[in-house]
Amino acid sequence: MSPSHSQRAPANAGRDRRNRFLLLLIAAIFLGSFVIAGALRFSGWRPAGMKNHGELLQPPGDLRDTQAVLADGGAYPWNPAGRTWRIALAPPAGCAEACVELAASLDTVWQLFGRNADHVHILWIGTPPPDARRNSAWRVLQPDPALIGGLPRHADVTGEAAGVPVYVVDPNGFVILRYAPGFDPGHLRQDMARLLKLK
């Protein structure tokens, strides 16, 4: 004999409640993940591996229309198609020992890029000290006020250690990161390594 309708009803009602509960639980997990992600996003939290060490410039500096000129008088084109990233600095006249040390640090950072080193130029705006270590990435540029003016807060070293700020310029000519004087060169290397993967 088959069970009567009245005997099947409690079993079906229990199964329906369980199914409804599971459906609500799945919906809560799904929607809850969006709520948590939105809260983290709007609070400014980012995973440690995604944070840059340099100061993200908002808005970025814009050097696209600046005519950079090499020390020998030749033009330095931005050439976005070349996908070349730049590390730029404009030390003051008379910067000696500190600039020699900075040049050595930038040389070490550049060499650590390995096979990606060919996609990075070091733009030294002005006259480097004679003892500064150089490599094939160096491009010495004439100190044009428009070029230096395109480096956000270049002269703003109030509250910072004495020295020279360093900038990262993207392939299009936008100045996107600033490193305060006395920065850790390892931080520049880490940030640049992530950026070079974007090419």
Image: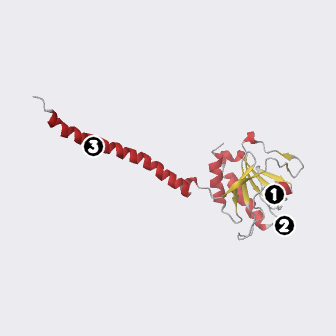
Quadrant of the image occupied by residue 48: bottom right
* Total residue callouts: 3
> Does residue 51 appear left or right of residue 99 in this picture?
left
Residue designated by label 2:
94
Residue projecting furthest to the top = 1
Residue designated by label 1:
149
Kindly report the distance in space between the C-alpha atoms of the residues bearing marks 3 and 2.
78 Å
Labels 1 and 3: the sequence-earlier one:
3
- Look at the image and tell me whether residue 143 can be seen: no
Labels 3 and 2: the sequence-earlier one:
3
Residue designated by label 3:
18
Amino acid type for the residue under numbered disc 2: Gly
> Does residue 137 appear left or right of residue 11 in this picture?
right
Classify mark 3: helix, strand or loop.
helix
- Look at the image and tell me whether residue 183 can be seen: yes
Amino acid type for the residue under numbered disc 1: Gly
> Does residue 36 appear left or right of residue 80 in this picture?
left
Residues at circles 1 and 3 in contact by the CB criterion of under 8 Å: no
- Estimate the x, y position of residue 103 in percent, counting from the top left: 75, 59
Classify mark 2: helix, strand or loop.
loop
Kindly report the distance in space between the C-alpha atoms of the residues bearing marks 1 and 3.
67 Å
Labels 2 and 1: the sequence-earlier one:
2
- What residue is drawn where x is 79% and y is 47%? 64
Q: Quick one: quadrant of the N terminus?
A: top left
Mark 2 vs mark 1: in front: 1
